Image (spheres, grey):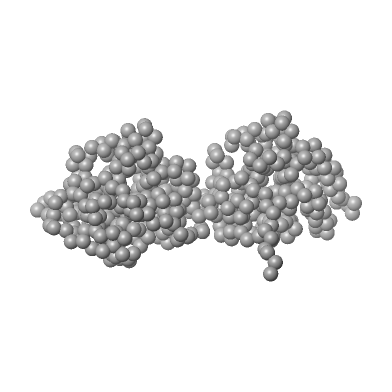
Amino acid sequence: MSAIQELAKSPTGIHGLDEITNGGVPKGRPTLVCGGAGSGKTLLAASFLLNGIVKFGEPGVLMTFEETAEELASDLASLGYDLGKLVEEGKLVVDYVRVERSEIEETGEYDLEGLFVRLEHAVSSVGAQRIVLDTIESLFAGLANPGILRAELRRLFRWLKDKGLTAVLTGERGDAALTRQGLEEYVSDAVILLDHRVEEQVSTRRLRIVKYRGSHHGTNEYPFLIDRDGLSVLPVTSLGLSHPALKERVSTGVAKLDDMLSGQGYYRGSTVLLSGTAGTGKTSLAAHFVDAACRRGECCLYFLFEESPQQLMRNMLSIGIDLQQWVKRGLLQFQAERPSRFGLETHLASMQRAVAKFKPAVTVADPITNLLTVGTHSDVRSMLTRIIDYLKGESITGLFTSLTPGSRELEETDAGISSLMDTWVVLTIAEQNKRRRRWLSVLKSRGMAHSDTVREYLLTERGLQVLDGEPEARSGGGSKAAAGL
């Protein structure tokens, strides 16, 4: 049996895209990037080209039919690309071809010979290995004859292949096809579809590999971001259960809660859920955990969905926790966003990107139930499953708080993710003798013996203090050692 030969590929240098394409776009072949207006086609194509020059030493040609070289240079400068410098260094040619519909005459002799002459000159002048044509339908804006259109498209794609150029062509999405002409997708070796959708007044950008001849590739829709760092794709729909299971333990930040967890606290790299009604102290307990981690010299990333970092830090001072000191020392970073600002996929992409950039040992999301304002229970569970999977893969300890409405059972979480958590701590409030008293219990903690008692605790100027109770029984910590699983 002959060995399987992998298709040669050219890396795009775009975070995530090379992963879901298993190495990049097909080398020496054309790739079509299509989508609606504002979906990011030009940015993806330009990133492929410019990353090829800067990161992989492959000169390129950018031929545009809509924007001038000056306009493109201005647009891409905001993302850190200096087109003028690359042109001066002889690594890039930017050629603006003006096409006017009124000047196009549809005759039997219509062809792209003039375009090929310009392309040949541009390619040879810098020894180009990559080329971008943006956008392809502009060449055929005035043609209605499908025979001529098909023939010239095939001729263009064959010319690119014969020259051995790795090409990316952009195209506007059509009404009934991926592109306006509906032909480019059939003659391209790979097709990437970009989509910018708005649901419930919330926008989300997504990417899908529609076609890739001769190569395995991710077939799901993947969220992607466009920000000051450019375009990045997050292949977050590929879940796995191959993450490590560390034996190291980390303190909860509350000594007597550590005692309830066999005296050592949470497993490093595990997931922890703090759930309870309003006013039970979920955020206070999360702040204890962050403070303890920073005291160990570990970096912490705190996602806030309900209050500002300044408000949180001020409030924690009332129980003796100074988080500002860790921010100043660079050990603690906050990322605060209202859930309604983005869709769930964008929140997921943003969170994963922030984690990858900061590389924390501990991550907190407070509270995850606020995400229900922009998605269904099923959608939120799916999103959190993927972020949990990512955190575990990076051996990052993740702590999540969840608000349980008073009308619900206290051992039921709105996001429905209790089964995904390794440790589940439930906080409650009960009124006794005209006084509200707070109670804490460890509902489950996989892989360790843990207390099965319910302990009273106080929020004081010296922090959260768990009171002594009856001698503790210990329950096992199997993989499903808890009610509610």
**Residue pushed farthest left?**
433
Query: How far across and how far down the image is residue 210, in percent?
Result: 64, 59
Of residues 409 and 354, which is closer to you in this image?
354
Please name the residue shown 64% across and 48% down the image.
11
Horizontal relation, residue 277 to residue 356: left or right: left
Q: In the picture shown, does residue 331 fall above or below 478?
A: above
Is residue 108 visible in the rendered image? The answer is yes
313 or 449: nearer the viewer: 449
Residue at 89% x, 54% y is 108
Q: Which quadrant is the N terminus positioned in? A: bottom right
Residue 321: image location, x then y, percent: 26, 38
Could you tell whether 47 is left or right of 303 in the image? right
Choose between 419 and 204: the one closer to the eye: 419
Say which residue appears at 31% left-offset and 57% top-offset.
423
Residue name at image x 67 percent, y 49 percent: 10
Which quadrant of the structure image shows residue 215?
bottom right
Please state if 114 lies on the left or on the right of 212 as rendered.
right
Q: Position of residue 102 (x, y in %)?
A: 81, 44
Residue 317 x %, y %: 25, 36
> Where 333 sits versus 192, above or below?
above
Residue lying farthest bottom? 1
Image quadrant occupied by the C terminus: bottom left
- Which quadrant holds residue 314? top left
